[in-house]
Amino acid sequence: MKPPAFTYHRPASVAEAIRTLADVGAEGKVLAGGQSLVPMLNMRLTAPRHLVDINGLTELSYVDSENDAVRVGALTRHAQLARDAEAGRRVPVLTEAMGYVAHPAIRNRGTVVGSLVHADPAAELPAVLLLCDGEVELASATGTRRVGAADFFIGPLESALRSGELAVAARFPVPPPGTGAAFIEVSRRAGDYALCGLGLTVTLDADLRVARATAAYLSVGPTPVRVELTPAVVGQRHDGADWAGAGALAVAAVDPDDDIHATSAYRRHLVEVLTGRAGRLAARRARQRWEES
Ligand SMILES: Cc1cc2nc3c(=O)[nH]c(=O)nc-3n(C[C@H](O)[C@H](O)[C@H](O)COP(=O)(O)OP(=O)(O)OC[C@H]3O[C@@H](n4cnc5c(N)ncnc54)[C@H](O)[C@@H]3O)c2cc1C
């Protein structure tokens, strides 16, 4: 299959990219790693008249470990973030999730921010951004704005990005002290999109009791779904918390569809089981964090 005809733009600066996006408006799309856009063009699932290729904008290729967040520029490839030890130390769940994103060849080319804008509900990084309460930074000819993860993912393959906007970076906040995290998913083959997955964080207080537990699920609805698990486990010991109760809370909060890969019932089962596994693992890691501090 070949893509429909389009005009190719290769801006030399962020300012030029934004000007070009303003000129072409709703007829334009940004080309980043092309790992989702190019197959969609070839299958004619999308037909923009203009492609604005940002691969020359090397100033957007960075991972900044700030005091309170890991900030990732729009041209940062998945593999680049996965290799960044400082980012992994600050937001470990981000690095753990990266290992589940597709295959090495795709991770070498696909971008972190592209994955967020693409807003596939089966993708790992949107769920991680939601779990961390992160945000996406957007720039256009009329200014810049930041959109929090809770407002960014609107529907399947639909984000809050407006026409004429370039997503320039994403921020993944550092969790509070005493927090452990885990990312787990189930897929038919390694590298496939998950049938169900989740990132989960547990924060323990100084008595090693659960102060807060939160999870964000993928592949269980039109967007990633964040569930506050705290009511099921708050005040309980780190090694004896009611993760079955947390799993039941999560099952009540999701509404997965049947599809050719799995039934809704199977996905609900995975939500329950994986919540327990991730909860126990995250609580163990939270305890280690206290011991190391
Ligand atoms: C075989 C295969 C398996 C895969 N498996 C997985 C998987 O298991 N998990 C997973 O998460 N992903 C998976 N992917 C997708 C991959 O992670 C992509 O890299 C990612 O979805 C999009 O990043 P990209 O840089 O390639 O974006 P592109 O394909 O270039 O763009 C995707 C969309 O985002 C828009 N966009 C991109 N960057 C910007 C920007 N800075 N500003 C505004 N708009 C922008 C584009 O216009 C387009 O609409 C898979 C892909 C393939 C081909």
Image (cartoon, grey):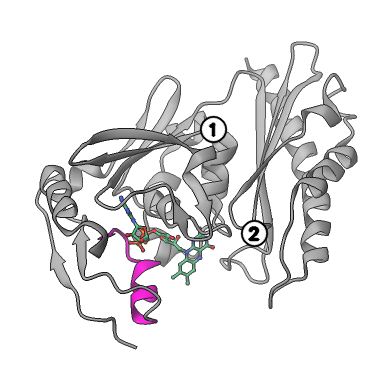
Question: Looking at the picture, does residue 176 appear above or below residue 255?
Answer: above
Q: Which mark is residue 146?
A: none
Q: Is residue 115 visible?
A: yes
Q: Position of residue 109 (x, y in %)?
A: 34, 61
Pointer 1 or 2: first along the chain: 1
Give the x, y percent position of residue 23. Answer: 13, 55
| Displayed quadrant of residue 292 | top right
Name the secondary structure under disc 1: loop
Residue 75's spot in the image, x, y percent? 28, 49
Residue that carries the numbered disc 2 in the rendered image: 219
Ligand 1 located in image quadrant: bottom left
Q: Residues within 10 Å of mark 2 (few under 14, many from 20)?
A: many
Q: Is residue 127 left or right of residue 239?
A: left
Q: Is residue 85 magenta?
A: no
Which residue does the image show at 56% across and 40% down from the upper left?
130
Q: Is residue 36 left or right of residue 222?
A: left
Q: Which residues are magenta?
A: 29-43
Q: Is mark 1 within 8 Å of ligand 1?
A: no
In the image, 90 versus 229, the foreground residue is 229
Judging depth in this view, the residue of 20 and 230 nearest the camera is 20
Q: Position of residue 58 (x, y in %)?
A: 19, 47
Front residue of 182/197: it is 197
Which residue does the numbered mark 1 point to in the structure image?
133
Q: What's the CA distance linking mark 1 and mark 2?
A: 19 Å
In the displayed structure, would residue 15 be above or below residue 49? Answer: above
Whether residue 78 is situated above or below residue 42 in the rendered picture = above
Q: Secondary structure at mark 2?
A: loop
